[in-house]
Image (cartoon, helix red, strand yellow):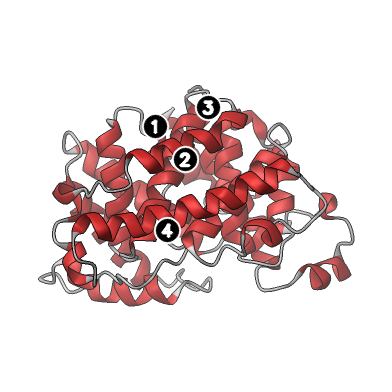
Amino acid sequence: MGGKATGALLGLAIGDALGKPTEFDDVEQIAWQWPDWRQLPLPPQALVTDDTQMTLALARGLRTALAGGPLTPPRLERAVREEFVDWWRSPQNNRAPGMTCLRSCQRLSTPERRWQTASDVGSKGCGANMRVAPIGLVRELTPDQAAGAAQLQSALTHGHPTALAASDLTAYAVRRLAEGLAPAELPATLRDHALANRTRYHASWLGDLADHAQDRSPEQFVARGWDDCLAVLDRLDAALAAPDVEADPCLATGEGWIAEEALATGLLCFLLLPDDPMAAVRRAAYSCGDSDSIACLTGAFAGAHLGAGAWPADWVERIEYRDELLELGTLWD
C-alpha cells in the first residue's frame, strides 16, 4: 500500500478544504465566482472543517488504542471517546460542526456515562462516515475488527443503523482501494459486503446499542441501515450507467447531508474520474450539497487508489494540519 495511507489522508483534507467555501451554496451561486468547475481553486490558506478535525481525532484515538495491543472494543472506545471530547472542548472547534456530534460529545464528556446512552440513535448524518477513513488504512486489522471499529466509532455519536452501515462501507471502500481493487469493481464489491452483513449485529463492539432504538431485534435494527445503503448503491449504479461529469453529482445520488448519500455521491465523483484526482475532488466540491463532506470522501477514495503522488506538492504544502496528516500517513504506510 506504498503511500496509500498518506494519499488518502491528504486527499480527504484537500477535498475538505476545497469544499469548505462552497458548502452552503448551490451550483448557480458557486458559478458566479468560478464558472468552470474544473478550475475551482484550492484556497491559498487551505483551511479544513470539522470533517478533517474529527478524522484526526479518530486517527489519534486509533493510534493510541493500537499501541496497547490488538484492537478491542474497550481500547478503541476509551481512546476515541477521549479524543472526541477533547475536540468538542477545543477552541479550534469553530468550523460549523454538526449538532449531532456536538450534543453526543457533550454527553460523552460525562465519564461515568455509558457511551450507548450518549449516542444519537436517530441521527444518520454524514458526520460519522466522513471521518472513518483511518480505519480502512490500518493493515493489521482483521475484517471483523475493521467492521466493528468502523461501526463503533460511528455509534459514539451517530447511532442510527444507516450511519453504522455507511461507516462500515466507507472504511471497507478505502481498504479495498488501498489494496489495489480496480475502481470499476468497487460498486459490486460494496454491494456484496452489504448483502453479506445485512443482518449481522456486532454485539461485542456495539453492546446494547440496538436496545435504544425501536426495532424488534438487533438484526432488524442493522438491516434497516444496510437496506438504506443498498438503495443508494442502486442510484449510484444508475448514475454510472449514464455518466455525466458536467452535471451536479448531487442530482443523481443525493446532497450528502445524510450518511448513505455522502458515501454514494463521494463514490460517484471518484468513479467518474478515477484517474484524475484533482478533477474528482473539484467535481465533488462544486455541488449543491454538503460539499466539504462529499469532497472529503472523494479525496479519501482517490488517495487510497492512487497514493500520495496523486496530489500536487503545492496543494499539500498549503493544507492545514499537513504535518500531522503526513505523520499518520507514514505510520500506516
245 up-or-down from 273: above or below: below
Labels 3 and 4 touching (C-beta < 8 A)? no
Q: Nearer the viewer, mark 2 or mark 4?
A: 2
Which residue appears at 79% of the width and 47% of the height? Answer: 245
In 3D space, how far apart are the residues under numbered discs 3 and 1 (Cα atoms)?
Answer: 10 Å
**Under tag 1, what secondary structure?**
helix
Which residue appears at 31% of the width and 39% of the height? Answer: 146
Image quarter of residue 103: bottom left
Crowding near pointer 4: few (<14 within 10 Å), some, many (20+)? Answer: many
Q: What type is the residue that disc 1 sits on?
A: Leu
In the rendered image, residue 225, in percent from the top left (x then y), is placed at 37, 57
Disc 2 target residue: 191
97 up-or-down from 244: above or below: below
In 3D space, how far apart are the residues under numbered discs 1 and 4 (Cα atoms)?
Answer: 18 Å
Which residue appears at 53% of the width and 74% of the height? Answer: 96
Disc 3 target residue: 3
Crowding near pointer 2: few (<14 within 10 Å), some, many (20+)? Answer: some
Disc 1 target residue: 331
Disc 4 target residue: 54
**Under tag 3, what secondary structure?**
loop
Q: Which mark is residue 219?
A: none
The answer to which of marks 3 and 2 sits earlier in the sequence is 3
Q: What type is the residue that disc 3 sits on?
A: Gly
The answer to which of marks 2 and 1 sits earlier in the sequence is 2
In the rendered image, residue 130, in percent from the top left (x then y), is placed at 48, 55
Labels 3 and 1 touching (C-beta < 8 A)? no
Q: What type is the residue that disc 2 sits on?
A: Arg
